[in-house]
Image (cartoon, grey):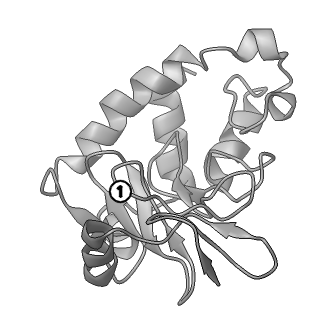
Amino acid sequence: MQAVDVRTWRRQNGETMTDYPTQPDHALRERITELSVHIPCSTLRGPINQRLWQSCRHEDTPARWGVDVSRLHDLCIVCFRGTAGGTSRWSWLACEHCRAVNDQHGRPLPLGRHTLMNRQSVEDAIGGDWRLNAWKEHEYRLLALRFAPDADVPLREWQQAWPPSVMASREAFARLTGL
């Protein structure tokens, strides 16, 4: 291993790693022992396994995995209860329940990470769906009020408080779209 700078190092095979944690991030990674909802930003962060850490934008040195998206799990963008995501640009942004409800209504919401998944052109997708952006500010904030505003809530605790279900997805979808 060859040192490059404080935040980057290079393996013998040339692979560059940028997830070498700074001192504050190291302390954070010691404190968070399971995948958790970071209340200030609604992002899941924490250990995926013993060798892989999922970061949020509030970390000094977010982990980068060398894939399309350095996130394996995210909260669903519709119900904020189930999980979605994956490391590919072809991953879904909504849980399986919300995707099923969206499909039942003719796919009015763009729930795929890539525009082709949403049957949109790049021009149509610029700026995202304003309903989903406003929805996050409203719905997520209501659910998050149960917890301290700067907390990292373990995902299992979040889902105990807000269990994912088909009914929760239908209700969230109805409030979001009016359908």
Q: Residue at x 67, y 52 (%)?
A: 69
Horizontal and vertical percent for residue 125?
A: 71, 17
The three-letter amino acid code for the residue at tag 1 is Glu
Q: Is residue 83 above or below residue 92?
A: below
- Name the quadrant of the C terminus: top right
Label 1: how many Cα within 10 Å (few below 14, some 14–19, many 20+): some
Q: Residue furthest bottom?
A: 50
Front residue of 11/167: it is: 11
Front residue of 158/148: it is: 148
| Left-right relation of 1 to 18 | right
Q: Residue furthest top?
A: 123
| Left-right relation of 136 to 72 | left
Horizontal and vertical percent for residue 44?
A: 44, 60
Horizontal and vertical percent for residue 76?
A: 53, 49
Horizontal and vertical percent for residue 18?
A: 56, 63
Residue for badge 1: 59
Q: Residue at x 87, y 30 (%)?
A: 116
Front residue of 29/36: it is: 29
Q: Residue at x 19, y 61 (%)?
A: 151
Q: Is residue 111 above or below residue 43?
A: above
| Left-right relation of 102 to 51 | right
- Name the quadrant of the N terminus: bottom right
